[in-house]
Amino acid sequence: MPELMPNAPLIKFKPKFIERYSALTDWEKFKTYNLSFLRRCIRINTLVTTVKETKKSIEEKGWKLEPVPWCKEGFWISHPDRRDVGNLLEYYIGKIYVQEAASMIPPLVLQPKPGDIVLDLCAAPGSKTTQMAAMMKNEGLIVGNDYKGQRLQSLGINIQRSGITNTIITLQHGKRFHGFNFDKILVDAPCSGTGTIRKSLKTVNIWNPGMITKLARQQSELLHNAFENLKKGGELVYSTCSVEPEENEGVIHRFLEAYPNAKVVKVKLPGLKVAPVITEFLGVKYNKQVKKTLRIWPQDNDTEGFFVAKIKKSA
């Protein structure tokens, strides 16, 4: 079992939150993992180094690296006396990127290739953008977009530090893209963050069903517009760090009802444990294709909670 946070007994969950998640999953396990420390994790940046070289240099400093099963560049990192991963030289010179293990999943599902034209619709601070650039070997083009100028600062810094040259940054709302034909699109949508409670406990206090409904409408708008900018035969990944059905399976259900030329692609990543998806919620029975999506609870892999769907546009 993971290590509980010292203030865990003081955290109070709202009755409606407990009621909801008791019906969706094993509440006691979900609560325990959400009130436990999140393991630090890094991704080795193969644009400027090799996994073997950087793993060796970090381990020689007394750090322990445990492989992330679904990402060959990913490692959980720990030290008996230190927690300051950001002070490693390898971090400063762009050889590693501090990135949560579940956050590595959407790019791995999207599988951008060298030469692809890719849109990262909600890119800041850049963990998935920089991961995709490495997968593409700095070839092709990534448009890294976000809608807040302040968020673009961190995106720009991370792109530069990682030695990336195939990415341009744009500043606009995701619904403003029109008339493009991207090969691949990542929609890592803004969400309630209920999969990341163990990283941000304030989520417990601000959670309310009304907020979820509003976010789901915004997420649907982003997904629909992204699909309009995807070329025929192209692929899109929709992901959130939420475990709310309305933001995940519900968004995909409404999308599939609106676009008959969209097909959900079933994916499987070696070593990744996934949970059964939600097929019906609040009286709504979801489209059968929703069963092909990935639902990841924090307790499944001792990570953040995540949802990932891969969609192909008919030629």
Image (tube, helix red, strand yellow):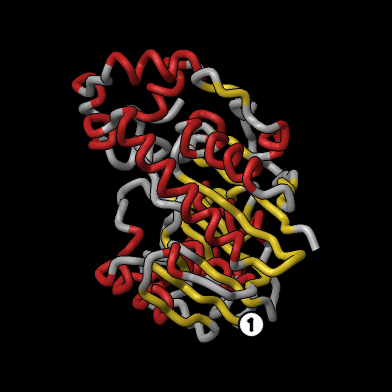
| Residue plotted at (48% across, 56% down) | 222
| Residue plotted at (43% across, 19% down) | 21
| Residue plotted at (63% across, 72% down) | 182
**Mark 1: secondary structure:** loop
Report x, y in % for residue 188.
49, 55
Q: Nearer the viewer, residue 16 or 1?
A: 16
**Residue 10 in which image quadrant:** top left
Residue 45 falls left or right of residue 150: right
Instruction: Name above or below for residue 62 compared with residue 118.
Output: above
Amino acid found under the numbered disc labelled 1: Gly
Q: Nearer the viewer, residue 265 or 80?
A: 265
Instruction: Name above or below for residue 269 compared with residue 173.
Output: above
| Residue plotted at (55% across, 76% down) | 142
Q: Nearer the viewer, residue 12 or 221?
A: 221
Q: Which residue is mark 1?
A: 140
Mark 1 crowd level (few <14, some 14–19, many ≥20, 10 Å Cα): some
Report x, y in % for residue 44.
53, 66
Residue 205 falls left or right of residue 81: left
**Residue 13 in which image quadrant:** top left
Q: Quarter of the image containing the C terminus?
A: bottom right
Report x, y in % for residue 206.
23, 34
Is residue 278 among what the camera can see?
A: yes
Is residue 54 among what the camera can see?
A: no
Report x, y in % for residue 202.
23, 37
